Image (spheres, rainbow, N blue to C red):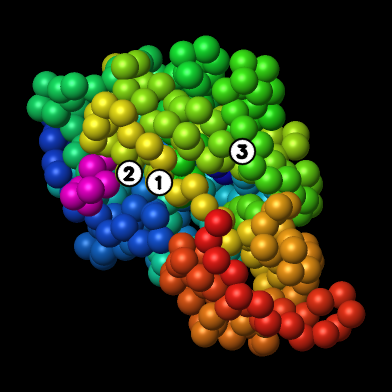
């Protein structure tokens, strides 16, 4: 979740309005690489925006050059791993999402081409929570549509778990829920993340004390590519947790990666694979309508390692202990030359996008070619385990 701070004028991001006094619209979306892509209209031009409740409204430098929006100030923007960049804050005069007209919303101007993997989505910005704060938003991932309204009576919220919503300074939506009815915690709902759930180190220690978790693997390295940078190498744990409870509804035996020093809990769009989500920014309520009362987490296996790009090439980010990848000699930092048919001998936009969009890590088997620390080229085959 990109955070803004430290502007001299201390501009309030929660400004602007919606033109209609009442509104209700169903908006189809594309789901590409577990990102919701919606069509936004600016000055009669269609643009592609990522729908990201964990972010503020952001627009590309190209949109700003075309429209010359009023500049408010320059602020520091920190990404998910704490790297800051100076960015310009402007006021968007008007844009349309479906039939709904948003007016005078503060927006960050960003270089959308800088994150090389996200650039594969050919996107123009982010719809963030500061723009959505006067709305009720329902996400139906199965049928690929959003409902945006200001009348809760018009939305289907039968058979749902309901909890209070806390909005942060950027109007990011935070909810309270429990692990195994014993550990209560608060987490951001971040639709821009493709994870199911990220758990802070402090929350994990509480879960561990209640004997609600099981250590699967240890690792050391980096696995997070944020908006401005890659996270620093650190100790990681891959753990299985008994379940997360939404009232009487449960998602059992989910797997999460715990980073040393991590301070934030968050649910990602992975939660929406298990049911419809309604974020009522207006009345400050959150609803989860599960597909089934009791569900079991579906993504439990690993190929034993995670890749990460640096400025010049793609490398091994983390190798998990007690896996075939570790037994075959794979180590963090090894340069990757090829994953299945994707050639990384010379890094290119095409190979980056093939890795990002094809998601070979979801396949049951992988062939990996790499250079080890003796400068020897090796090829291994890995299976999900």
- The Cα–Cα distance between marks 1 and 2, rounded to whole angstroms, is 10 Å
Closer to the camera, 357 or 283? Answer: 357
Q: Is residue 242 above or below residue 335?
A: above
Residue 325 seen anywhere in this rendered image of the structure: yes
> Which residue is drawn at the image coordinates 46% and 62% (left, top)?
362
Within-10-Å neighbours for mark 3: few <14, some 14–19, many 20+? many
Q: Position of residue 226 (x, y in %)?
A: 61, 53
Magenta residues, as a range? 138-145
Give the mark nearest the N terminus, 1 or 3: 3
Residue 298: numbered disc: 1
178 to the left or right of 22: right
The residue that label 3 is drawn on is 239
> Which residue is drawn at the image coordinates 78% and 44% (left, top)?
235
Closer to the camera, 86 or 312? Answer: 312
Q: Position of residue 159 (x, y in %)?
A: 18, 22
Secondary element at tag 3: strand
Q: Is residue 332 above or below residue 239?
A: below
Q: Position of residue 116 (x, y in %)?
A: 57, 69
Within-10-Å neighbours for mark 2: few <14, some 14–19, many 20+? some
Whether residue 141 appears in magenta in the rendering, the answer is: yes
Secondary element at tag 1: loop
Residue 273: numbered disc: 2
105 to the left or right of 28: right
- Answer whether labels 1 and 2 touch (C-beta < 8 Å): yes
Whether residue 311 appears in magenta in the rendering, the answer is: no
Give the mark nearest the N terminus, 3 or 2: 3
On the rendered image, what quadrant is the N terminus found in?
Answer: top right
């Amino acid at each position: 979740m990109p955070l803004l701070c430290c502007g001299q004028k201390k501009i309030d991001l929660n400004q602007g309005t919606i033109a209609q006094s009442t509104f209700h619209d169903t908006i189809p979306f594309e789901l590409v690489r577990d990102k919701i892509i919606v069509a936004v209209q600016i000055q009669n031009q269609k643009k592609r925006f990522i729908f990201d409740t964990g972010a503020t409204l952001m627009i590309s430098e190209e949109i700003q050059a075309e429209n010359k929006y009023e500049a408010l100030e320059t602020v520091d923007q920190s990404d998910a791993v704490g790297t800051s960049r100076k960015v310009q804050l402007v006021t968007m005069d008007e844009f349309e999402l479906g039939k709904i007209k948003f007016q005078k919303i503060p927006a960050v101007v960003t270089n959308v081409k800088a994150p090389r993997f996200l650039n594969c989505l050919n996107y123009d910005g982010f719809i963030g929570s500061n723009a959505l704060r006067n709305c009720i938003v329902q996400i139906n991932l199965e049928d690929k549509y959003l409902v945006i309204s200001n009348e809760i009576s018009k939305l289907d919220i039968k058979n749902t778990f309901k909890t209070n919503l806390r909005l942060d300074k950027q109007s990011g939506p935070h909810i309270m829920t429990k692990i195994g009815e014993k550990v209560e915690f608060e987490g951001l709902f971040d639709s821009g993340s493709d994870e199911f759930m990220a758990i802070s180190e402090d929350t994990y220690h509480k879960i561990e004390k209640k004997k609600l978790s099981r250590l699967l693997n240890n690792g050391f390295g980096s696995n997070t590519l944020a908006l401005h940078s890659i996270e620093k190498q650190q100790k990681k744990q891959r753990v299985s947790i008994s379940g997360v409870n939404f009232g009487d509804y449960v998602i059992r035996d989910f797997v999460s990666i715990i980073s040393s020093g991590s301070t934030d809990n968050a649910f990602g769009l992975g939660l929406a694979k298990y049911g419809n989500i309604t974020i009522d920014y207006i009345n400050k309520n959150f609803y989860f309508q599960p597909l089934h009362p009791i569900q079991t987490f579906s993504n439990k296996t690993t190929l034993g390692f995670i890749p990460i790009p640096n400025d010049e090439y793609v490398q091994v980010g983390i190798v998990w202990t007690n896996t075939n990848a570790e037994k075959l000699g794979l180590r963090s930092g090894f340069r990757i030359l090829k994953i299945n048919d994707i050639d990384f001998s010379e890094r290119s936009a095409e190979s980056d996008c093939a890795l990002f969009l094809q998601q070979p890590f979801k396949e049951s088997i992988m062939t990996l070619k790499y250079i080890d620390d003796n400068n020897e080229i090796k090829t291994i085959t890995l299976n999900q385990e």
